[in-house]
Amino acid sequence: MITLGDYLAVSGILFTIGFAGVMLRRNIIIILMALELMLNAANLSLVAFSRFHVGPAGTPNYNAQVFVFFIITVAAAEVAVGLAIVVALFRLRQTTHVEDITTLKF
Amino acid sequence: MSPFLFWMFALQMLVFGAAVIINRNPVASALSLVVSFLGLAALFMSLDAYFIGIIQVLVYAGAIMVLFLFIIMLLDLRAEKLRRINWIASAGGIAVALALMVQIFSVIGKFPAARQPFPPLARPASDDVRHIGLLLFDNYNLPFQIIGIVILVATVGVIVLSRRETH
């Protein structure tokens, strides 16, 4: 029997993979993809809780699913702006490697 | 959903999610991310969230990943050459990620509801689009309009950022 904890554990592992990607990789585009993994891990646990809290009418709690809808919308906007910044940066420096971009580094 | 299907799709999502950060070729990473998102959409549908599963496929695996692939091919990124790896920084990153995972698992282990199975639904939730739409235009009308403004601002911002300066 699949329990709520199984979904939460899978979601936690996915979040950890995305977090490790942000910490370890040095390519900005891969870092953006790892950010998407972390957002989706949060979405998975939200949908699991939505299914777990069955209301009096016998339906899932749809508030969490509306929240997931908002998260997906904001993620789409974030990816568009992030990739536009990457393109502008590449035009200026011909690199997507974070260690080559150190102007703001203390 | 049967436990076998759950573990199959969860394993697909996690293996290809790990492949995203292991691959050195950005195109391979982006395609692994598509497969990982398809597994995630299947998990959403196993939780009776059909609408979320569909927009996961349409928006994420469709639109966002095409945008990623388009930018990778526009910038003509090849597989990055192996640079000198900073072992201390890498070990620190892995240690922080593992500490985070241990924390998440200890929180889940102390959460009593995590050991309960999902309660049954009154009937199959095939009309979830109607419920989500009602909530979206009723309870969450103001956030919905704000999210529209966010999309508009992002569109204008992308155009401003990617415009070439002409002197």
Image: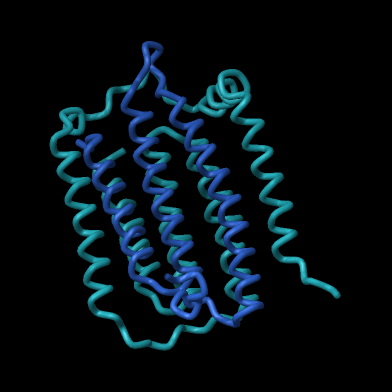
Q: From what the image shows, is residue A89 above or below residue B146?
A: below
Q: Name the quarter where the C terminus of chain A is drawn.
A: bottom left
User: Residue A72 appears at what percent x and percent y?
Assistant: 53, 44
Q: What hue represents chain B?
A: cyan
Q: Is residue A106 left or right of residue B167?
A: left
Between B92 and A41, the one nearer to me in the picture: B92
- In percent of the image, x 30 and y 22: which residue is there? B120
Q: Residue furthest right?
A: B167
Asked if residue A70 lies left or right of residue B149, the reply is left
- Quadrant assignment, res A83: bottom right
- The quadrant in which residue A105 appears is bottom left
Q: Residue at 24% of width from left, 66% of height from top?
A: B94
Viewer-proximal residue, A89 or B101?
A: A89
| Callout count | 0
The vertical placement of B112 against A31, above or below, is above
The residue at the far top in this view is: A56
Q: Identify the residue at horizontal 35%, vertical 21% (top origin).
A: B121
Q: Is residue B71 above or below residue B118?
A: below
Residue B15 image point, x, y percent? 31, 63
* As drawn, B1 above or below B68: above
- Colour of chain A, in one word, is blue
Residue at horizontal 54 percent and vertical 26 percent from the top: B132
Residue B129 at x, y = what percent?
Answer: 56, 29
In the image, A101 versus A87, the foreground residue is A101
Residue A18 locus on image (x, y percent)? 36, 58
Quarter of the N terminus of chain A within the rendering: top left
Q: Give the colour scheme of this rendering.
A: by chain
